[in-house]
Amino acid sequence: MSMLYNSERRKLLQTVNQFGFALSDITLFLDTHPNDQDALDYYHQMNHMYKKASSEYEHQYGPLTQFAGEDDNVWKWSVQSWPWERGYC
């Protein structure tokens, strides 16, 4: 596996994780400030970016979770290599 492949994969995974963290953080804030429109707008922005980054990662490298899947007629999660077997750990 090439170094460039691993580097791009790690960078994209880091992006997914950053947007996921931002979503978790803003969700906690919204739990106590449900009427804060700026926070809600930020949540929607981060949710959009998270979904976009996750979709790009999964398209290129495979599912991040067992809930992701491109084809509902085929169960891919247990058939593909496990995340730690994919070379980015």
Image: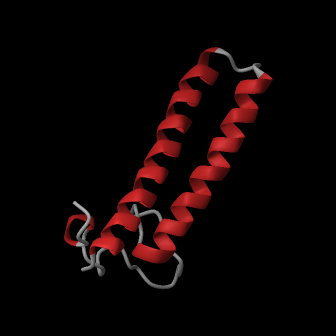
Quarter of the figure with the N terminus: bottom left
Colour style of the rendered protein structure: secondary structure
Position above or below: 64 against 73: above
Q: Is residue 68 above or below residue 49?
A: below
**Is residue 88 something one can see in this rendering?**
yes
Q: Residue furthest top?
A: 32
Question: Percent position (x, y) of residue 51?
Answer: 59, 56
Quadrant of the rendered image containing residue 81: bottom left
Percent position (x, y) of residue 69?
Answer: 49, 73
Tell which of 40 and 1 is nearer to you: 1
Instruction: Tell me which residue sits at (50%, 34%) in the image.
Output: 24
Residue 32, quarter of the rendered image = top right
Residue depicted at 40% across the width and 66% down the height: 8
Residue ID at (75%, 34%): 41
Residue 9 locus on image (x, y percent): 38, 66
Vertical placement of residue 10 versus 62, above or below: above
Q: Nearer the viewer, residue 54 or 6?
A: 6
Q: Residue at x 36, y 60 (%)?
A: 10
